[in-house]
Amino acid sequence: MRSGARFFWQLYAGYVLLVVVFAAVVGASLSHTITDHSLQEIRNQLRAKAILLSVTAEQALDDDPAGALQRTIQQLSPQVDTELAVITESGKVLASSTRRTEQIGQPDQPEIQQAREQGEGYAQRFSPELGKEALYHARKIESNNKKIGYVRTALPTDVIEEYLGRVRRLVFLAALFAALVALGLGLLVARRVTAPLSKMTEAARSIADGDFARRVAIDSSNEIRDLANAFNTMAEQLNMRIDTITKERRMLQTILSGMVEGVVAIDHDERVVHMNGVAAGLLEVDASRSIGARIWEATRVNEIAKALTSSLSGGREVRTQARLLRNGGEALVEINAAPLHDGDQELVGAVVVFHDVTEVRRLELVRREFVTNASHELKTPITAIRGFLETLAANPEMPPETRHRFITRAAGQGSRLSTLVTDLLRLSQLESKERPDSFEAVDLREVVRGSVRDLGTFASEKGVDLRYELGDQPVLARSDAPTLSLIIDNLVDNAIKYTRTGGKVVLRAFPNNNFALIEVQDNGIGIDPVHQARIFERFYRIDKARSRELGGTGLGLAIVKHACGVLGAEIRVQSMPGRGSTFRVRLPAH
């Protein structure tokens, strides 16, 4: 049963009880009062009839002491609906409406005795002449200043009870009618009072279920309307506050979800209350299943659990690092834990923020290696050039042949230095270059022909057969022609350098499903599998002496890799030592 209905029946039941008790009390009191009044009225009527009978009896006795009085009483009794009798002082019945000869007026009867002493008397007793209970009234009479005796009027009590019963029934019906009317009015009043409360109860339930737009409409002008207005105002303010809290919560969730750092928050019982997606990914757990679990149950990373526990127990910030074992290897994360306080500055939990610095550390290592390698590569030709120039300056009398040889070597080192700087600038440009939003359609056959044309002279000088194998149909790719030429030129240049005299380098371009492929194949010295994973690193050389001898800078394949990244291409290598290498570039087809 709804609370509004319960309140209605409680209110109405109390009202019904009050009405019933009031009606019973008032009805009983009214019935008692009317009964007393009716009995008094009956007594007054018996007295009035006795007075009338005494006058009649006096007149009748003066005319005819015997027969006239009896006839008068016989005629008068039906008219007044009362038993009448005239009794002498000695108790003899002179006349009676009951027509009985027995002595019914004995002087010891209570009403006669009271009349003898006080002039009139009342009594309620069993009547032998009537054979039932009756109410008597006796009155002393005199005729010509002579005591005659008494007149007496009587009315059976069953007649009185019948009359009083009618009176009581009338009082009961009136009380019942009044009670029913009161109950009906009470029902309307109770419904009028409880109906707005029921509406407010339903509105409160709707608000509790999330319907903050629910309002209460009350058509009245009393305190109920004021209560409804206050309720509607409260609902509006609550709706505004909930909207504000919801917006702030969504904003906070958006911020936490958009962070590159992992965030985990715990309460004072060390149970997880929040975990964003980055944290779940780093810890390799399910964020939704982790909510409510102990921190050491949600993650097995001891450093994170320990940092949160220390921050929670000590109320201070904790910073540390941890290494996470993942399927892809090992990850290094930095951990920052801090305590959480509520508005009263009470400690309620702790939060940890951690992010993967593996790539940062790797880039730092790559940067250090790059600086070291670049410094070394730049220092070598500079040192050589300086040595040649200092030797020339110190020996002005140096033979022309030796001087020419030194100058030629210095010029070669200068050329190598220029090539190194050029490759470094080109690599820097590729690293800072963003991938274009759109590419043009490039026929790979034209790029291949251009590369063979540009490097044909170098291949002839080296004694390498440089050729291409192309079909008749265009091989179109979504690419950038200059960047693609840079990739092919570096691959072909490397292939020529590391192919022995008499070898060959073959270029191919052909479509493959949704891609376009370029192959650069040689039958040169090949690459050992242990080196194939690192050949695209800066300054990485398999044979440093041979590479420098051939004029390599160790940046060609690094340039190729970054250029492929700009084009969205993929490069792979297949190679066996002594059998040559095949570099394959796959680009999206146009």
Image: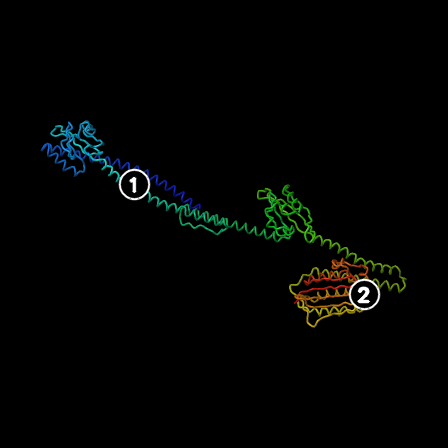
Residue occupying image coordinates x 43% and y 50%:
217
Mark 1 near mark 2, Cβ–Cβ under 8 Å?
no
Residue occupying image coordinates x 38% and y 42%:
13
Q: Quick one: 200 or 535, which is closer to the camera?
A: 535
Measured as percent of width and height from the top left, residue 440 is found at 66, 67
Circle 2 — which element?
loop
Q: Using the numbered discs, state the Cα–Cα distance from disc 1 to disc 2 in whole angstroms.
A: 134 Å
Residue 457 is left or right of residue 290, and the answer is right
Q: Is residue 215 shown above or below 171? A: below
User: Where the C terminus falls, by quadrant?
Assistant: bottom right
- Inspect the image, locate mark 2, and give the three-letter code of the amino acid beneath it: Arg
- Inspect the image, locate mark 1, and give the three-letter code of the amino acid beneath it: Phe
Name of the residue lying farthest toward the left: 63
Place residue 65 in its image quadrant.
Answer: top left
Circle 1 — which element?
helix
Measured as percent of width and height from the top left, residue 136 is found at 20, 32
What is the number of the mark on residue 186?
none
Disc 1: which residue: 172
Residues packed near mark 2 inside 10 Å, few (<14), some (14 to 19) or many (20 plus):
some
Q: Is residue 56 shown above or below 513? A: above
Name of the residue lying farthest toward the bottom: 472
Disc 2: which residue: 500
Measured as percent of width and height from the top left, residue 421 is found at 76, 61
Place residue 95 in its image quadrant.
Answer: top left
Residues packed near mark 1 inside 10 Å, few (<14), some (14 to 19) or many (20 plus):
some
Q: Quick one: 360 or 572, which is closer to the camera?
A: 572
Q: Is residue 491 shown above or below 13? A: below
Measured as percent of width and height from the top left, residue 59 is found at 11, 33
Point out the tag, 1 or 2, that comes first from the N-terminus.
1
How many numbered discs, if any?
2
